[in-house]
Image: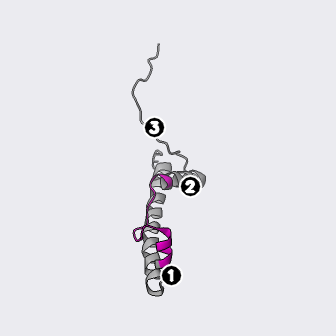
Amino acid sequence: MPTKNTCNSSSSRYNHDCSVKGIASNFMKIRKDAAVSKPITTGSKTGDYAVGKIPGIGKYIKAGNWGSSIGANVSHAINAYNESCGNRKKK
């Protein structure tokens, strides 16, 4: 009689589908789990809006905030690809 496997294997909440749809699904899950906040902020939406309207300062604040969000999205995409396609057997 076969025995039951009683070991606790870890299960991932990400799918291991290496298609574009599977990678996009994992990207959205990772992006939701690891949200990135703005590094340059006043703490209130009206304050951010007012400071952003100042001609010399607004562009630099937007560029600083976009830089961190672009870097975060790149790392989320790499992680999503690794979760989807990294677990396949290599030929």
Quarter occupied by residue 34: bottom left
Disc 3 + disc 2, Cβ < 8 Å: no
Seen from this angle, which residue lies furthest top?
Answer: 1
Q: Position of residue 58 (x, y in %)?
A: 46, 81
- Relative to 24, does residue 43 appear above or below in the rendering? below
38 vs 89, nearest the viewer: 38
Crowding around mark 1 (Cα neighbors within 10 Å: few <14, some 14 to 19, many 20+) is few
Q: Which residue is mark 2?
A: 24
Measure how far apart labels 1 and 3 are at the Cα level.
48 Å
What is the secondary structure assignment of the residue under circle 3? loop
Label drawn at residue 84: none
Residue 40 placed where, x, y %?
40, 71
- Residue type at mark 3 is Ser
Query: What is the secondary structure assignment of the residue under circle 2?
Result: helix
Q: Residues within 10 Å of mark 2 (few under 14, many from 20)?
A: some
Residue 50 point in image, percent of width and height: 49, 78
Between the residue at mark 3 and the residue at mark 2, the CA separation in whole angstroms equals 20 Å
Per the rendered image, the range of residues in magenta is 32-50
Give the label, 1 or 3, closer to the camera. Answer: 1
Residue at point 50%, 45% (across, down): 14
Image point 43% across, 80% down: which residue? 60
Q: Which residue is mark 3?
A: 11
Report how far apart the C-alphas of labels 1 and 2 lie in the structure. 35 Å
The image shows residue 11 at horizontal and vertical percentages of 45, 37
- Tell me the amino acid under the disc marked 2: Ala
